[in-house]
Amino acid sequence: MTDRSPFFVTTAISYPNGAPHIGHAYESMATDAIARFQRLDGRDVFFLTGTDEHGQKMLQTARAEGIPVEDLAERNATRFRDMAAALGCSNDDFIRTTEPRHHEASREIWRRMAANGDIYKDSYSGWYSVRDEAYYQEGETELRADGVRYGPQGSPVEWVEEESYFFRLSAYQDRLLAHYEANPDFIGPDERRNEVVSFVSRGLKDLSISRTTFDWGVRVPDDERHVMYVWVDALTNYITGAGFPDENNPRWRYWPANLHVIGKDIVRFHAVYWPAFLMSAGLELPKRVFAHGFLFNKGEKMSKSVGNVIDPFALIDHYGLDQVRYFFLREVPFGQDGNYSHEAIVNRINADLANDLGNLAQRSLSMIGKNCEARLPEPGAFTAEDEAILGQADAMLAAAREAMSRQAIHQALSVVWACVAEANRYFASQEPWALKKSDPARMATVLYVTAEVIRQVAILGQPVIPTSAGKLLDLLAVPADARSFDRLGAGGRLAAGAELPKPEGVFPRYVEAEAPAGGAA
Ligand code: ME8
């Protein structure tokens, strides 16, 4: 039975204070793969992404560039929107926190938290990191030899003293701990969950949730001198996207979100502040928050000064979209930090895509083209070898589903590529080219079985390599309405006799443009 229940998945919303980088692209690709997987598996998916446009960081960048902050937001939000499109993201909406619908939602959640008695006015004095847009306790900061005080993520902090509204976060310590205990899947991976539990167990202080020294933000209801602390409005984007506060909005059926995909640096906001705000406002909590790791360029942190910031648009232009998506999602265990380098990308493109899958498809399909009048051959009785490889293909869905339920995207891919590897061994050992003369009926069976395995690989490959998988399915004449996961397994076998188009290569090899320096003379 297909599960048609709603599945709401989000990315973090990025600060458009600069152009998007590969870290942002990584999160979008991964979340898109998750959204596509669930859609193909029959779920009613809503996939939300967008930009987080308020806060001091945006203001400071705009000032440094000498342009109005609205212009900075506009310019870069467009680049983030373009990036999502360039990455082939299937997001259903793109939210910008400067939109009126979002101001309305933020003011409403504030009113509900206030009505619940959780907001009071006082004055704040303490450390603030503009880069992280985060308040830190003195004990979390460190005064270094350069005379500058730094926060736990290595960004400088400044002393802030101003009138501020506070949220009674301290009152939520026990309820949060009880929630983590009762819902062991609320935070993933486990390492992140343990960090959150230990942070909350040490005790929570009330949180300053408004600022008065600038006005770039959502105005606090009934007190126009204050704008909301940027994270209060930023987190609210997830319910704005679902139509809040209009609970008659058809999108409200998607709340609570099934999954917030975020990076490991913003776990505290999503797993501590956000559930506390929602509890206070009487709203349901998201089911899961999953934190991916950070990407490094050959082990080095990307930074503008080092000059190793990778532009996702350039990467896609250079290697191809599906190639980039496949590389990052296969290479980096989702949840751990990862590295990328030209060599590693080329290796994945050539080994996994061009050789393993591309060559198998090309060889088997061109044999069908030449020897079977371009029609899918009628198979004879299956041998034990045929049954074994078909069985492995039929078993992929269950294993991939299990992996995807833990956001182990790399494991889902490894299940599929293990089947590709096995199909290559099958093809090589059956030697269909030799059967052509000796036993054409057996050759037909081997080609049919190989094509059927490729069909299932392509269907399951769609979340990560949608365009190339689509081309493979075209080459197999699989109709558009027969490409979802309910067609996997024995029930969806290829129809013998179907006419196939002329086969063409789907996965080009990456060839170095110029010989490496000092190459062979
Ligand atoms: O944090 N590798 O925005 P942001 C992997 N506006 N992921 C990375 C990364 C890297 N090198 N650098 C950043 C914010 N990310 C807030 C979010 S959500 C209500 C508000 C990830 O533009 C980062 O962890 O700094 C985050 O999930 C996302 O990119 C946006 O980061």
Image (cartoon, rainbow, N blue to C red):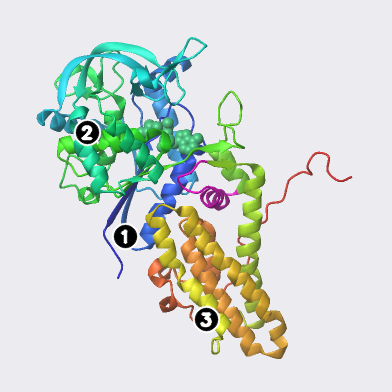
Which quadrant of the figure contains the N terminus? bottom left
Task: Label 2: state its secondary structure.
Answer: helix
Asked if the residue under mark 1 is in contact with the one under mark 3, i.e. CB atoms within 8 Å, the reply is no
Sequence-wise first label, 1 or 2: 1
- In the rendered view, tell whether residue 120 sits above or below residue 491: above
Sequence-wise first label, 3 or 2: 2
Residue 500, quarter of the rendered image: bottom right
| Nearer to us: label 3 or label 2 | 2
Dot 1: within a 10 Å radius of its alpha carbon, few (fewer than 14), some, or many (20 or more) residues? some
Name the residue beneath numbered marker 1: 43
Q: Amino acid at mark 3?
A: Glu
Tell me residue 88's x, y (percent).
47, 49
- In the rendered view, tell whether residue 423 sits above or below residue 74: below
Sequence-wise first label, 3 or 1: 1
Q: Going 63% across and 69% down the picture, which residue do you hit?
A: 360
Please give the range of residues in magenta: 320-337
Which label sits on residue 227?
A: none
Which label sits on residue 173?
A: 2
Residue 124 vs residue 41, the one in the foreground: 124
Residue 89 in sight from this viewpoint: no
Q: Is mark 3 within 8 Å of ligand 1?
A: no
Tell me residue 304's x, y (percent).
56, 25
Left or right position of 209 against 281: right
Q: Amino acid at mark 2?
A: Gln
Residue 25: say if magenta: no
Which label sits on residue 387?
A: 3
- What count of labels does the image hold? 3
